[in-house]
Image (cartoon, helix red, strand yellow):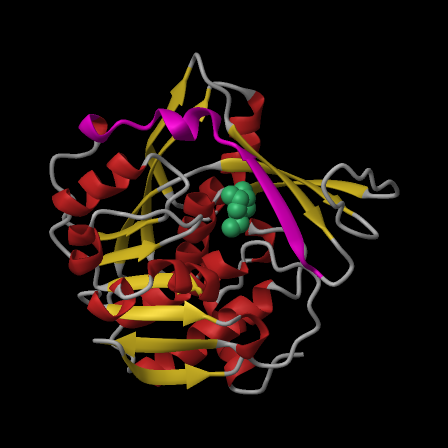
C-alpha cells in the first residue's frame, strides 16, 4: 500500500513535566513532584504519531535557535519526519509547555508559545498538494491560510479551542474535537462539511457526518499513566485511517486503540504507538 503523505502545519514545544501527588488549585503550591522533559507540541506530536503509524510526514513549523529546539525535534528527526520547513528564529525561544500530571494521569498545561506565535501566513508554501493537518496552537490566520492553500484532504484538530472562519470548517474533510470543544462549536458541528470525530474521554469517541452519528466506539481497557498527547495520537490515527479508506467504525476503533495505548506511557511523543502496537492491541495480542 502507498504511504499517505501528510504536511503538518503546527506547533513544536519542549514539554517540562512535573509528575505530582496532586494538581495545584489556583494559588496553591504542591511539592513532591518528579521532573521529566519530553519533545511535545500538538503539531509535532501529531506529526510523530502519523510517522509511527506509517505516513510520510513533512512538518511546517517555527522554533527558536536554542538548545530546546534540538531536544524538541529529536524524536521527529529519529523517525524520519521531513524537517526542512522548520525554521529556527534567532529572536524567539522554542515553545515550552509546563505540564502537571497527577497520579490518575490527568494533566494541566501552560504553554509559552515563543516561536510558534511567530508563524506568518505569507511564509506558507503557495500550494499544499499533500493532505494537510493543522491544530490551533499557532496563529489562527496561519491555519486559515493553510486551509485555503490546501489542494487535497484537510484535517483540523480544534485544540486548544478557538473559532475558525466558517469556510475552514466547511472545507475540512475531518474535524477532531473533544466534548467541551464540540459544545463550544454548537450548531456548527452539524454544519461541518466533512466527518466530525468527537472524543469522549474514558467513554471513547463518536463520529458524525451531516450532524448524524455514523459510529461510536468505547476504548480498550488500559491502565492510564498519562493522558498528555492522547488527543494528538487520536487525531493522527483518525486521519491516517480515513486516508487509508477505513469505514467510520473501523477508523474510530483504530484511533481509540492508538490513543488508549498512548495513555499507558508517560509523556506525549515518547508515548506515540507504532502501527504494529495498535494492530496488536486491536487483535488482542497486546501484552
Ligand atoms: O496535546 C499535548 C500537547 O499540548 C503537549 O505536548 C504540550 O506541548 C501542549 O502543547
210 lies above or below 114: below
Task: Using the image as rendered, state which of residue 259 and residue 145 is in the foreground.
Answer: 145
Q: Report if residue 153 is visible in the image.
A: no
Which residue occupies 26% across, 63% down? 188
Q: Is residue 224 left or right of residue 201?
A: right
The residue under the point 61% across, 60% down is 227
Quadrant in which the C terminus appears: bottom right
Where's residue 241, x and y in %? 33, 71
Q: Residue 112 falls in which quadrant of the image? A: top right
- Using the image, determine if residue 198 lies above or below residue 29: below
Q: Position of residue 138 (x, y in %)?
A: 37, 37
Q: Nearer the viewer, residue 54 or 13?
A: 13
Residue 115 sits inside the magenta stretch: yes
Report whether 191 appears left or right of 96: left
Quarter of the figure that contains the N terminus: bottom left
Query: Which residue, as the protein is rendered here, is positioned at the far bottom?
Result: 284
Q: Residue furthest top?
A: 91
Closest to the observer, 114 or 94: 114
How many numbered circles are shown?
0
- In the image, residue 98 above or below residue 214: above
Question: What residue appears at the point 52 percent right and 36 percent down from the top-left corner?
Answer: 13
- What residue is rendered at 62% in x and 64% in y? 263
In the picture, measured across the screen, residue 96 lies left or right of residue 34, that is left
Q: Is residue 113 left or right of residue 154?
A: right
- Residue 94 horizontal/vertical position (percent): 50, 26
Q: Position of residue 269 (x, y in %)?
A: 55, 50
Give the extent of the magenta segment.
Answer: 105-122
Amino acid at each position: 500500500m502507498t504511504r499517505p503523505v501528510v504536511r503538518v502545519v503546527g506547533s513544536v514545544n519542549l514539554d517540562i513535566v512535573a509528575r505530582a501527588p496532586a494538581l495545584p488549585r489556583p494559588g496553591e503550591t504542591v511539592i513532591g513532584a518528579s521532573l521529566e522533559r519530553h519533545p511535545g507540541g500538538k503539531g509535532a506530536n501529531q506529526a510523530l504519531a502519523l510517522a509511527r503509524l506509517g505516513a510520510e510526514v513533512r512538518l511546517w513549523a517555527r522554533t527558536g535557535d536554542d538548545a530546546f529546539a534540538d531536544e524538541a525535534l529529536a524524536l521527529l528527526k529519529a523517525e524520519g519526519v521531513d524537517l526542512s520547513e522548520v525554521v529556527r528564529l534567532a529572536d524567539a525561544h522554542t515553545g515550552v509547555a509546563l505540564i502537571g500530571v497527577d497520579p490518575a494521569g490527568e494533566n494541566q498545561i501552560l504553554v509559552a508559545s515563543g516561536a510558534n506565535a511567530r508563524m506568518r501566513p505569507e511564509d506558507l508554501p503557495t500550494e499544499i498538494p499533500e493532505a494537510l493537518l493543522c491544530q490551533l496552537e499557532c496563529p489562527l490566520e496561519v491555519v486559515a491560510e493553510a486551509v485555503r492553500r490546501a489542494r487535497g484532504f484537510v484535517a483540523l484538530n480544534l485544540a486548544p479551542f478557538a473559532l475558525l472562519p466558517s469556510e475552514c470548517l466547511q472545507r475540512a474533510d475531518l474535524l477532531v474535537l473533544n466534548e467541551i470543544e464540540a459544545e463550544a462549536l454548537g450548531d456548527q458541528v452539524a454544519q461541518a462539511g466533512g466527518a466530525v470525530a468527537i472524543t469522549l474521554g474514558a467513554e471513547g469517541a463518536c463520529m458524525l457526518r451531516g450532524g448524524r452519528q455514523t459510529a461510536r466506539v468505547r476504548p480498550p481497557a488500559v491502565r492510564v499513566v498519562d493522558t498528555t498527547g492522547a488527543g494528538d495520537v487520536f487525531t493522527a490515527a483518525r486521519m491516517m485511517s480515513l486516508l487509508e479508506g477505513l469505514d467510520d467504525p473501523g477508523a474510530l476503533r483504530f484511533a481509540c486503540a492508538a490513543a488508549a495505548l498512548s495513555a499507558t506511557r508517560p509523556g506525549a511523543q515518547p508515548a506515540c504507538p507504532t502501527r504494529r502496537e495498535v494492530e496488536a492491541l486491536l487483535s488482542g495480542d497486546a501484552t
